[in-house]
Amino acid sequence: MDLKDKIKNLADAYYNELVAIRRHLHAHPELSFEEKETAAYISNKLDELGIEHTTNIGGHGIVGIIKGKNPTIKTIALRADIDALPIEEKNNCDYASKNIGVMHACGHDVHTTSLLGAAKILNELKEHFEGSIKLIFQPAEEKLPGGASIMIKEGVLKNPAVEVIFGQHVLPQLETGKVAFKSGIAMASCDEIYLTVKGKGGHGAVPHLTIDPILIASHIVVALQSVVSRNANPIMPSVLSIGKFIANGATNVIPEEVKLEGTFRTFDEQWRKEAHQKIKTICESIALSFGGICEVNIEKGYPFLKNDEQTTNASFALAQQYLGAENVEEMPARMTAEDFSYYSQEIPACFYRLGTGNISKGITSSIHTPTFDVDENCLKIGSGLMAWIAIKHLSQ
Ligand code: NI
């Protein structure tokens, strides 16, 4: 039997166990930076497999290592995020969240289960590859500054140095059985904009005695649209959206201040820096010209995600071998963000999408919604394909 079939058979054989793991994780979600029980559960599973690992890296992060033959010649890493979201689950299944107000609505339970499944397969097959595989169970993907940045600071990519890293993410819009890749720039950088426009409140009937922060803020919202439409290079995707505008006056009350919040996303670090400056200048000078002030706070989030072209193209071909060409798709870049991007700024990386939807079973809800769920058949591919890609990259 060839290696590919061995992996497929193992993924099939472990399927019931993987479903049980995923359901346990799904029922017991924990918020970013609070993944204590989740980490203990993962550590326990790695103990059962006899995989050496270190806990409490970058918070509740865990790093395991599987050594093949000649373990020092090459090291690659596989990463899964383990945290959940502050969402109240509305699914009625028996594995629905038991932690009220917390839910695995971004599929990190699937990512974690898949990595445990891949680990089990790779551990079984360690006579079949040379080099080592680091298993990174990463906390706090959903919350700044992101668990990835902390784990990197704590040396997760060193000792031994990781040559290339792989991660996967659920995609409910893609049918289970399929995966999708995007070579090159794949996901955007993401910064949070917080603005406080201060004027002078007063009676709505005597506006000449006030400095109206609502009018100032309105001008700011309109003017900010010019950052993308007039300053960004048109062939470089950028987006600036204001999603919060709080002006707590009344029909006859002009308030003292207005709070605005928004997001800025793009794919170029230099332009990102320039855009921050542009946003600051526009907000401050418009407020000033109306006699008010604007406090600008831009909280820098994740950088953009770059999928290494050689690694991604090779992984695409490997996925075609494993799943059949008809089940592997190319996808466009997305303006969403993901802290896996931090790894991609350090070493060659490949982050691909795992199809988890199933229209005929009615599994269609988007991620970050209270009804998100997956077709659990995705766990076979989530673990098997990852193991296949890891082994083949080690033997290249
Ligand atoms: Ni996610």
Image (cartoon, helix red, strand yellow):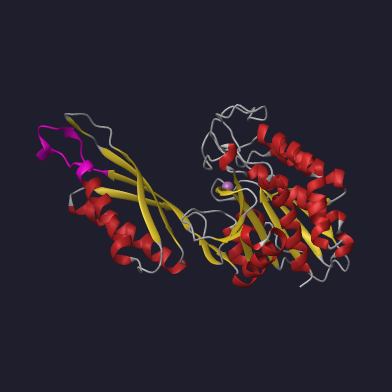
Between 203 and 111, the one lying in front of the other is 111
Q: Position of residue 51 (x, y in %)?
A: 85, 51
Q: Residue at x 19, y 41 (%)?
A: 212
Q: Is residue 214 magenta?
A: yes
Question: Which quarter of the rendered picture does the N terminus lie within?
Answer: bottom right
Q: How many marks?
A: 0
Q: Residue at x 46, y 64 (%)?
A: 267
Relative to 309, residue 30 above or below? above
Between 339 and 350, the one lying in front of the other is 350
Q: Is residue 262 magenta?
A: no
Q: Position of residue 153 (x, y in %)?
A: 65, 58
**Would residue 289 be found to the left or right of residue 41 on screen?**
left
Question: Which quarter of the rendered picture does the C terminus lie within?
Answer: bottom right
Can residue 297 be seen at all in this image of the molecule?
yes
Q: Residue at x 73, y 39 (%)?
A: 19
Q: Position of residue 18 (x, y in %)?
A: 76, 42
Q: Residue at x 75, y 60 (%)?
A: 388
Q: Which residues fall within the magenta stretch?
A: 198-215
